């Protein structure tokens, strides 16, 4: 496959958007896209001349990496669903790319994380997001990238992502 991609995004896939709560991470697109992009959908995408799809992902849900083992509690489920999608899409000549903006904020109510790592807290704010056809608000804290632990987590998390998901679009 050439490095020139024609990327498709299905309107049927649930883009979790800006944020989901840690308790609800199994509704993230990284867990649900394998159902949306079934073989008939992938075949139709390929027939239409597209050779890639993108899905939204939150790195702190997809991986479980040091020095923040509290993040990514369901990482195995996220990666299993992604592996299934990557393998099935490859049979149709399609690469899967993950759209991410790491690091994302961690809910301020995640006491397990913030009690252990108060030194990596950045700005706190209220995020508005949509879930179950309603508007919800969630207080979050940014992970401060000026701290060594956050930079180390980003390095470890990125490495784990590409090692655990061979065939992921954009990885070597």
Image (cartoon, grey):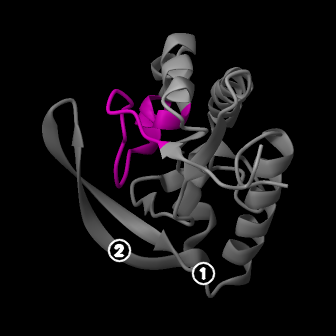
Residue at the top extreme of this rendering: 40
Residue under the point 46% across and 72% down = 142
Is 53 left, or right, of 36 in this rendering?
right
User: Hey, which quadrant is residue 4 in on the image?
Assistant: bottom right
Give above or below for 97 relative to 79.
below
In the rendered image, which residue does mark 1 sit on?
A: 145
Residue under the point 66% across and 84% down = 147
Q: Position of residue 156 (x, y in %)?
A: 80, 61
Q: Secondary structure at mark 1?
A: loop
Q: Position of residue 105 (x, y in %)?
A: 45, 64
Q: CA distance from mark 2 to mark 1?
A: 14 Å
In the rendered image, which residue does mark 2 sit on?
A: 124
Q: Which residues are magenta?
A: 8-30
**Mark 2: few, some, or many residues within 10 Å (few <14, many ≥20)?**
some
Give above or below for 150 relative to 166.
below
Q: Position of residue 135 (x, y in %)?
A: 14, 44
Q: Secondary structure at mark 2?
A: strand
Mark identifier at residue 18: none
What quarter of the picture does the N terminus occupy?
top right
Is 12 left, or right, of 30 in this rendering?
left
- The tag earlier along the polypeptide, 2 or 1, is 2
**Mark 1: few, some, or many residues within 10 Å (few <14, many ≥20)?**
some
What quarter of the picture does the C terminus occupy?
bottom right
Residue at the left extreme of this rendering: 134
Residue 56 seen in this snapshot: no
Per the image, is 24 magenta?
yes
């Amino acid at each position: 496959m050439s490095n020139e991609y024609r990327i498709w995004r299905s309107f049927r896939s649930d883009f979790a958007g800006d944020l989901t709560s840690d308790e609800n991470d199994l509704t993230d697109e990284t867990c649900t896209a394998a159902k949306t992009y079934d073989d008939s959908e992938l075949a139709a995408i390929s027939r239409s001349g597209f050779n890639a799809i993108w899905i939204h992902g939150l790195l702190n849900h997809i991986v479980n990496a040091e020095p923040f083992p509290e993040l990514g509690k369901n990482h195995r489920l996220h990666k299993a669903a992604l592996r299934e999608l990557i393998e099935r899409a490859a049979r149709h000549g399609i690469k899967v790319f993950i759209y991410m903006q790491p690091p994302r904020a961690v809910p301020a109510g995640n006491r397990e994380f913030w009690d252990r790592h108060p030194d990596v807290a950045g700005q706190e704010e209220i995020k508005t997001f949509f879930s179950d056809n309603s508007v919800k608000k969630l207080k979050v804290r940014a992970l401060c990238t000026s701290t060594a632990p956050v930079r180390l987590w980003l390095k470890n998390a990125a490495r784990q992502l590409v090692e655990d998901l061979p065939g992921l679009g954009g990885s070597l």
